[in-house]
Image (tube, grey):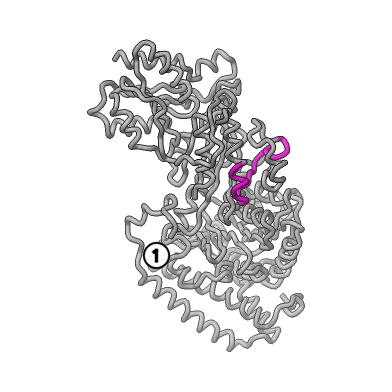
């Protein structure tokens, strides 16, 4: 962590505190969702824990007022930075009508919010890669200067849609950034049973820039993302970023996680990106322990508020299931 | 009024829509410089440039998926699948993505794409250049499936599809491309999706069909008229969602119904049409519902003997009508 300094990257103290705050908010919301799941209040959780540094570091290099994102199911940190609120995330966890992602139609983690430039996603993995490429194509055709950012897991890079989308972007030099959050597992199958080579090396075959980066360090991810964004805005085409991290929870609330050792998980928990960044902020004299504890207290209040709000919010009426199969007129 | 071939009408619809709205663009394999393997997009590359008539990598899922992404941010893509047989790698994008984008986002996002694909046999295309694939998609709410039968309808329906706010699969019978000609006005008209059309008024017997088979049914009806058999023909035009009212009306009108499709018989679009008639018209029927369809074999063989055996023809329709009329 210490070989990179935020000031050298053009980031202020306020910037890195904001980064940390978003990472911590994602973590605390995620932890609350697990509690709610184990208490029988919400049916399902799919976690961002261990990914927060990669997600927030990357999102910080984008412009939420201009760029589009096609996130995958773990990207709570990305969507928070793009303006989805804790209440909105909790509404999604509780499947309530007011959930802006889907109005309670989709499982949590299936993000989508047009006003915030967050594309709607599904469960079949990697389908969002061609979508992000199409968004970038539309931008290039209309001389708009936005970039399109898409994420997926390392297992999902084995899907045809990853290959087809990446190649399309490479052929037409489109402003797309593909970030693979490599957390070492596709549910139970470890990375050495998923990939014949390295994720970042796949970029070579698509004629795009490829780089592997420490996904536990938000500054390292920010640095390579910023370069990728600049290349994209200059018309120099797409980039593939592999952010290497570790999944700190089971795949989902329905996974028993019996396929990896407790020793392995304990070792990784000592390298929790949140703890590493906390230490960085204190070592760099950006924040004191007390300051960060206060921040945590405020976040817990936000998480409580979001939980209460979403729990009390109404479900969609049953017949709402019939709505919006096709266009029903302008609202 | 100009007489155009079926494919000229398709071409004209795209050209006019691209002139009308700069958000309309075409993408697919060989659509650019070559102008399409059937020449549907000929001249458009020269008129609109390479970005609006975009040659893509040989990648059907990306053709559909990239079109979906562009449509979500306001473009109006027309994606061409070179042959309907090759749409299968894009099924996940069409069924899991395009069809569900409005529904899953609770009306926040939508996906106004058109996917055009030549389907059907009788052109020595063998197993993988002859298939009818509409039934694979015809139980997917969120999709619309349009299959026109003549140049006039092709132009008006393709324009409606391009302007539609939801994804439309637009299947064109490749044997119809140059075989079928008809009058096509040069004005800007659209034909509503979801509406079947009576192509011939008659009182003895009803044929319900779509695509090239409409043409064959009309030929059969002309011959039968000489023998005093008066055939009513309903062209579905949209095979999903079906125009139930028109089906019920056409079936009830004569009480004898022949359903014709070039697709394999079991589980075809006509199976659903038969179910609608069985559900709503039982007491109007004077004979069992009859279906004439391709045999339940995997696809159309290459050799002319076997290809003819598979294909629907005016003669086959005429025989089926005579049998039903005699019931």
Name the image quarter holding residue B245.
Answer: top left
Q: Nearer the viewer, residue A207 or A292?
A: A207
Query: Which residue bears the numbered disc 1?
Result: A96
Looking at the rendered image, the quarter that the C terminus of chain B falls into is top left
Residue lying furthest left: B283
> Is residue A267 at all visible to an observer of this figure?
no
The subunit letter for the residue under badge 1 reads A
Q: Where B88 sits versus B71, above or below?
A: above
The N terminus of chain B sits in image quarter? top right
Q: Residue at x 54, y 22 (%)?
A: B300
**Residue at horizontal 44 percent and vertical 23 percent from the top:** B293
For disc 1, the neighbor class at 10 Å (few under 14, some 14 to 19, many from 20) is many
Asked whether A118 or A181 is in front, the reply is A118
Q: Secondary structure at mark 1?
A: loop
Magenta residues (range): B16-34
Height in image: A220 above or below A143?
below
Q: Name the spot of residue A24 as percent of width and height, x first.
A: 56, 76
- The residue at 65%/37% (across/down) is B41
- Can see residue A209? yes
| Magenta stretch encompasses residue B240 | no
């Amino acid at each position: 962590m210490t070989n990179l300094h935020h000031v050298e990257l053009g980031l202020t103290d306020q910037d890195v505190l904001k980064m940390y705050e978003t990472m911590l908010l994602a973590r605390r919301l995620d932890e609350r969702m697990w509690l709610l799941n184990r208490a029988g209040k919400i049916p399902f959780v799919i976690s961002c824990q261990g990914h927060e540094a990669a997600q927030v570091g990357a999102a910080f290099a984008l412009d939420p007022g201009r760029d589009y994102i096609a996130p995958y199911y773990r990207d709570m940190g990305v969507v928070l930075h793009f303006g989805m609120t804790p209440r909105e995330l909790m509404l999604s966890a509780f499947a309530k009508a007011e959930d802006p992602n889907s109005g309670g139609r989709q499982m949590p983690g299936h993000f989508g919010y047009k006003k915030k430039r967050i594309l709607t996603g599904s469960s079949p993995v990697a389908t969002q890669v061609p979508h992000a490429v199409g968004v970038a194509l539309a931008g290039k055709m209309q001389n708009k200067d936005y970039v399109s950012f898409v994420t997926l897991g390392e297992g999902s890079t084995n899907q045809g849609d990853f290959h087809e989308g990446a190649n399309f972007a490479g052929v037409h030099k489109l402003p797309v950034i593909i970030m693979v959050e490599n957390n070492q597992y596709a549910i139970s199958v470890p990375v050495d049973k998923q990939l014949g080579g390295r994720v970042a090396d796949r970029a070579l075959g698509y004629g795009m820039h490829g780089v592997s980066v420490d996904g536990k360090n938000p500054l390292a991810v920010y640095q390579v993302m910023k370069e990728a964004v600049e290349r994209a805005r200059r018309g120099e085409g797409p980039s593939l970023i592999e952010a290497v991290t570790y999944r700190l929870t089971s795949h989902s609330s329905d996974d028993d996680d019996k396929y990896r050792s407790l020793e392995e998980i304990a070792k990784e928990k000592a390298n929790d990106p949140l703890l590493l960044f906390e230490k960085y902020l204190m070592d760099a004299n950006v924040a004191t322990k007390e300051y960060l504890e206060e921040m945590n207290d405020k976040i817990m209040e936000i998480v409580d508020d979001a939980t209460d709000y979403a729990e009390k919010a109404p479900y969609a009426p049953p017949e709402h299931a019939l709505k919006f199969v096709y266009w029903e007129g302008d609202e | 009024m100009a007489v155009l071939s079926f494919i000229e009408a398709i071409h004209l619809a795209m050209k006019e829509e691209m002139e009308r709205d700069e958000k309309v663009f075409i993408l697919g394999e060989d659509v650019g410089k070559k102008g399409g393997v059937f020449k549907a997009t000929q001249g458009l590359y020269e008129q609109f440039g390479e970005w609006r008539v975009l040659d893509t990598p040989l990648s059907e899922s990306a053709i559909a998926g990239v079109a979906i992404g562009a449509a979500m941010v306001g473009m109006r893509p027309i994606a061409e699948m070179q042959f309907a047989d090759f749409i299968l790698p894009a099924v996940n994008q069409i069924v899991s993505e395009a069809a569900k984008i409005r529904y899953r986002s609770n009306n926040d996002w939508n996906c106004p794409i058109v996917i055009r694909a030549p389907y059907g046999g009788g052109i020595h295309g063998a197993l993988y250049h002859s298939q009818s694939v509409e039934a694979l998609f015809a139980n997917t709410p969120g999709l619309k499936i349009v299959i026109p039968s003549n140049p006039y309808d092709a132009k008006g329906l393709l324009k409606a599809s391009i302007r539609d706010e939801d994804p439309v699969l637009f299947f064109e019978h490749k044997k119809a491309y140059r075989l079928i000609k008809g009058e096509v006005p040069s004005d800007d008209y659209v034909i509503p999706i979801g509406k079947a059309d009576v192509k011939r008024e008659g009182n003895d017997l009803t044929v319900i069909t779509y695509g090239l088979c409409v043409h064959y049914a009309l030929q059969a009806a002309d011959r039968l008229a000489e023998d005093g058999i008066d055939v009513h023909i309903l062209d579905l035009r949209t095979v999903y969602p079906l125009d139930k009212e028109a089906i019920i009306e056409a079936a009830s009108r004569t009480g004898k119904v022949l359903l014709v499709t070039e697709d394999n018989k079991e589980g075809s679009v006509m199976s659903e049409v038969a179910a609608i008639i069985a559900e709503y018209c039982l007491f109007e029927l004077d004979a069992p519902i009859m279906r004439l369809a391709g045999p339940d074999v995997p696809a159309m063989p290459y050799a002319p003997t076997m290809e003819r055996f598979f294909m629907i023809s005016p003669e086959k329709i005429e025989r089926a009508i005579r049998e039903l009329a005699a019931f």
